[in-house]
Image (cartoon, rainbow, N blue to C red):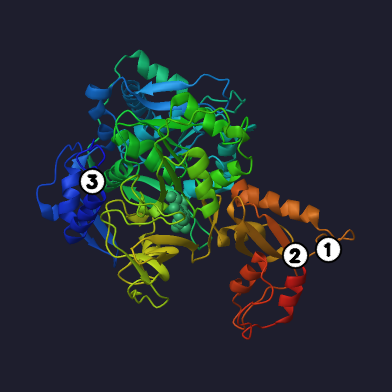
Amino acid sequence: MRKMSYPYQITSFEAYQEAYQKSIEDPAAFWESVAEHFVWKQRWTSKDQVLNWNFTDPNIEWFKGAKLNITENCLDRHLAERGNQPAIIWEPNSPDEPHRIITYKKLHEKVCSFAQVLKNNGVHKGDRVCIYMGMIPELAIAVLACARIGAIHSVVFGGFSAQSIADRLEDAKAEFIITCDGAFRGAKDIPLKAVIDEALIGNKIVKRVIVCTRTHTPVSMIKGRDVWWEDEMKQVEERGNLFIEAESMDAEDPLFILYTSGSTGKPKGVVHSTAGYMIYTTYTFVNVFQYQPNQIHFCTADIGWITGHSYIVYGPLSAGATSLLFEGVPTFPDAGRFWDIVDKYKVNILYTAPTAIRSLMGFGLGPLQGKDLSSLKVLGTVGEPINEEAWHWYDEHVGKKKCPIVDTWWQTETGGCLISNMAGITPAKPSWATLPMPGVQLLLVDEKGEEIKAAADETISGNLCIKAPWPSILRTTYGDHERCRTNYFATYPGLYFTGDGALRDKDGNYRITGRVDDVLNVSGHRIGTAEVENAINMHAGVVESAVVGFPHEVKGQGIYAYVIYQGSQAQDSHGSGDLVRKDILQTVTRIIGAIAKPDKIQFVSGLPKTRSGKIMRRILRKIAEGETENLGDTSTLLDPGVVDEIKRGRR
Ligand code: WTA
């Protein structure tokens, strides 16, 4: 039995089973009992208010009518007991620069001051604020300050291009931007403000850009539009009033928008609401990682992704934890960076992506030597399936076989972990995400949406769906509810469809086998093949393209692009086409960002299509994977000859 430090902390396997059972029998009663342990401005008055839903519209409401502010839960409620405890420990990109420790008291002050700055700049409840910053404490402060006044934040990862930002600004109709002059990432220095300036060419909606200093890169500051973070903060702080009242929000008011890739060309703005998201991220943070007060939690994700939102900012802070925020990359200045950080701060929980583990494995055991990792208690992974080799390396060399590893499966749309073992409480199984969290009702279906039932002792395989809402399920896709319905609730009516395939073993453990739609998972980042194709097709000379994934040793999946190119350069007299390839990569970087650059580009004269003109991706995927013999049924192909050419030209 573990120590129960939170009233809803599960401390044994039996307690997990019991909680799961209760959560299924009476979800409203179950989550009501968890919700009681949060700070509300006005509670729900009857059990009927706890949950109302249907998956047809869809319409999902948890605690609607009750009022709260998530920042009172993340900050104010901790002040009396842990005001002087570090809320955020910030480790900069370069180990030579001093780190920063921000206590709950200080963070509360800063969030209040910056909330006042937002108000002074005309930001109101419900306004959308785009945040494009590097991993500095001010990013967390900006996010929380928006929540404090009820503005809806939309954080865009610092690796996205000006074009991607412009699209997101327009979709969200955002009038405000918070950014930095630049960001440090490893040996690179990214000019964030310059990217914003480019994104704003032709934009008539954005009224104000607040710029925080980080890299001291020269930037253009446009009169009447751009202001410095530091000047604005100084004005507020000089007045000395470091408290502002938290806006009263309905439980169902939107908290944030986060854009993510789907199978269409355009990213979707996933909308999360306030109370359900808060309750579920806190609950899973405490239970999955078995957090104990005063432990140091180090999640290596960027706040630009859902993992950073839920398990660097909201979940840990709501639980009163100490969250370590790291600006850099795992291999800078060398591949021992994570281990130095664990050693320096005596980190207790390390939560990272399989890609990072595989990349560090590649450097051998040298970087681990002489690093004291004995403070580690729990290890976690997220974002993609973890292969057994990486799992065992993590277990042996990082956890020294003493730390449970939690393999957490979830999505931007789910807000928090849905399938995972609970550290030391429920059993781990290498490369299996294992069991559902309380409140999560999973099923596997076949192509037709029929539930696949297992005979005793059988492992089954199917498309992963969910029967009923958990508190942090997405509520809509911003500005287009129909899109939310068709994307998630229409493939199998009455069910939420995850887009993932999975296996379930006789003990009820789940293993995620990967996406079954046209979405790739590259280094744990979701990228839609249609988005990459659109970007490639923007390049002058490209006639058509088809993008598929292929297994990649470090990234999990790599991006393979088949391109029909018109013009002499691709097949120039040197025959290589390398310069055109580079131009195409440059175009993709411009349109989406470097994360979407194809690893391989093959020029082809045609694509395998059916008579109705549909690209047969299955064939392209097999060839990209290196399978050239068993391509399956090719009888519906319009021109089978093209397949032989593609096979010969494989890269
Ligand atoms: C994949 C990241 C296997 C999955 C939190 C999902 C995983 C997509 C795991 C969501 C895991 C995430 N094992 N696959 N533990 N975690 N995935 O929205 O395909 O960036 O649908 O959220 O990542 O990616 P997203």
Q: Residue at x 63, y 44 (%)?
A: 362
Secondary-structure class at tag 3: loop
Query: Do the residues bearing badges 2 and 1 touch, measured as CB atoms within 8 Å?
Result: yes
- Label 2: how many Cα within 10 Å (few below 14, some 14–19, many 20+): many
> Percent from the top left, x then y, of residue 137?
44, 28
On the image, numbered disc 2 is attached to which residue?
Answer: 603
The kind of residue on which mark 3 rests is: Ala
Q: Position of residue 10 (x, y in %)?
A: 24, 45
Q: Earlier in the sequence, mark 3 or mark 2?
A: 3
- Asked if the residue at tag 2 contacts the one at tag 3, i.e. Cβ–Cβ closer than 8 Å, the answer is no
Q: Quadrant of residue 529?
A: bottom right
User: Does dot 2 land on a helix, a strand or a loop?
Assistant: strand
Quarter placement of the N terminus: top left
Write down the residue under mark 1. Answer: 571
Question: Quarter for ligand 1?
Answer: bottom left
**Residue 364 locus on image (x, y percent):** 63, 40
Q: Which residue is mark 3?
A: 251
Please state, as top left, top right, bottom left or bottom right, where the C terminus lies in the image. bottom right
Residue type, numbered disc 1 = Gln
Instruction: For label 3, count other residues whose C-alpha is less than 10 Å away and answer few (under 14), some (14-19) or many (20+).
Output: many
In the rendered structure, the answer to whether residue 52 lies left or right of residue 364 reads left
In whole angstroms, how far apart are the C-alphas of marks 3 and 2? Answer: 52 Å
Mark 3 close to ligand 1, CB under 8 Å:
no
Q: Is residue 624 left or right of residue 522?
A: right
Q: Label 2 amino acid?
A: Phe
